[in-house]
Each structure stands twice: as structure tokens, then as C-alpha cells.
Image (tube, helix red, strand yellow):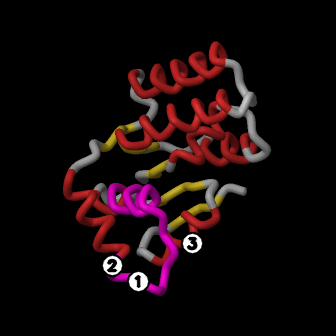
Amino acid sequence: MSVYLDTSVLVSIYYLESITPKARKFLTDKKGLSTSSFSIVEFSSAINRKILMNELSKQDGLKIINRFQNDIEEGYYKVYSFSPDDLTGANNFIIDNLGRVSIRTVDALHVAIALRDNCDLFVTADKAQAKSSEILGLKTKLIS
């Protein structure tokens, strides 16, 4: 089973949030965890935002980013490359669902990558992402 994790879930695994215990428990026995190269950048940006909001020190933020990158290097996650076709796919999702689905650009990109790589389950901690990814054809698990 291929389980695609969006950035909201990834951040909650490494940075203690209210949903962290649920996310960690849900993922404990899961195999085939994946994400995208796009998520790596988005993860660092999310940690930076927490530093700027004084929720996290720079030193702790770097430790979190390093732990995440180490897990990637050790093969804990399969990382799908971001491609120009993903931009086309995301744009098509938005155009095909004009007036029907509220989907942010980054969310459409996650969906395009997950669908391209035939993921069996899309996992997110973002309610809006969960709703739009289901409408766009992904079996979705919302961790909240």
C-alpha cells in the first residue's frame, strides 16, 4: 500500500502539535509511506514559520529539519520527484472544478503528485485539503 503524506501530517510527526499522537499512532504500522520533493521545501517553510512566530527556536527548528531529512535519506519515505506535468495536472484539477471545489495551489499540486504516482491513501491534517482531495478522486484520511 502506498500512503502519501502531505506536509501538514509530516510537520505534525516532527513538531509536537495537538494531533501529533494521532498522526504517529495512525502511521505506526503503515508501510509504503511517501511524499514529494515539493513537500520537503514546504516542510522547511512550515518550520521557518514556527520560528518566526516564536513557537520554536532556530536551533530546535534546525534539529527538526535535520531529523526529517535524515529519515528521508534512510529511506523511511519514498520521495516522488516534482515534475512540470504536476503543474499541468494541478491546473487541470482547478479548471475542471471551477466553482465546485475550493482548492489551494499547493493542495492541487499534492493531489496531482499523489494521483500520478498511484497512491492508495492520501493522508492530511488539513480539513480543506481532505475535502478537495476526496472530490478529486483520492481515498483520503483526515487526521484531526
> What residue is shown with label 3?
131
**Residue at the extreme bottom of the image, as rendered:** 99
Earlier residue among tags 3 and 2: 2
Give the amino acid type for the residue marked by disc 3 in the picture. Answer: Lys
Q: Are marks 3 and 2 in contact (CB under 8 Å)?
A: no
Q: Distance between the Cα atoms at labels 1 and 3?
A: 15 Å
- Residue 107's disc is none
Asked if the residues shown at circle 1 and circle 3 are in contact, with their CB atoms under 8 angstroms apart, the answer is no
Image x and y of residue 123, in percent: 54, 55
Judged from the image, the secondary structure of the residue bearing numbered disc 3 is: helix
Q: Which residue is mark 2?
A: 95
Separation of residues labelled 3 and 2 (CA atoms): 17 Å
Q: Amino acid at mark 2?
A: Ile
Query: Mark 1 highlights which residue?
Result: 98
Q: Which residues are magenta?
A: 95-113
The local crowd at label 2, few if under 14, some if 14 to 19, many if 20 or more residues have their Cα within 10 Å, is few
Look at 37% across and 57% down and name the residue there: 109
User: Is residue 132 placed above or below 9 in the rendered structure?
Assistant: below
Cα gap from disc 2 to disc 1, whole angstroms: 5 Å
Quarter of the picture holding the C terminus: bottom right
Q: Report the side of 135 relative to 9 (left or right).
A: left
